[in-house]
Image (cartoon, rainbow, N blue to C red):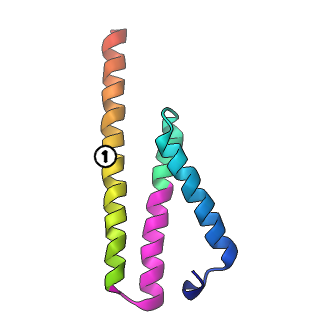
Amino acid sequence: MNGLGYPDYFTKLIGVLKVLGVIAILIPGYPRIKEWAYIGFFYDLSGAIYSCIASAGFQPGILFMGVWIGFWFLSYIYYRKLTAQQHAAIDVVTA
């Protein structure tokens, strides 16, 4: 992170926020917090890619971040499908 020009405290902050985001996504319930965690990971990953490109230009190692964005994207899609199924089941029960 020092090579990108970020201070040391920023690394610790991002680390703590990532751990909290993973916990928020893995714990069942709390759909609004999960949405915010997914948004936070999107901003984190896109910001990391931008920082790397802005500081050192495009490097092949940046493509590795695409793998993590792919995992994030698939996780979010399946989360939304699961949420839609749960809402549909609730609507059937209450009807």
Secondary structure character of the magenta stretch overall: helix
Q: Quadrant of the C terminus?
A: top left
The residue that label 1 is drawn on is: 77
| Residue visible at 32% across and 69% down in the picture | 66
- Comparing 46 with 8, the one in front is 8
Percent position (x, y) of residue 27?
A: 51, 38
Image: 55 above or below 83: below
- Judged from this view, the residue extending furthest toward the bottom is 56
Numbered circles on residues, count: 1
Residue 7 picture quarter:
bottom right
Instruction: Decide if residue 16 is on the left or right side of residue 47.
Output: right
Image: 17 above or below 29: below
Give, as a single range, the part of the protein colored magenta: 40-59
Circle 1: residue type: Ile
Percent position (x, y) of residue 94?
A: 37, 10
Percent position (x, y) of residue 35?
A: 47, 45
- Comparing 28 with 42, the one in front is 28
Q: Is residue 47 found inside the magenta-colored segment of the image?
A: yes
Q: Is residue 49 found inside the magenta-colored segment of the image?
A: yes
Instruction: Decide if residue 77 is on the left or right side of residue 8.
Output: left
- Judged from this view, the residue extending furthest toward the right is 9
| Residue visible at 44% across and 60% down in the picture | 42
Percent position (x, y) of residue 6?
A: 61, 80
- Judged from this view, the residue extending furthest toward the top is 95
Residue 78 picture quarter:
top left
Q: Secondary structure at mark 1?
A: helix
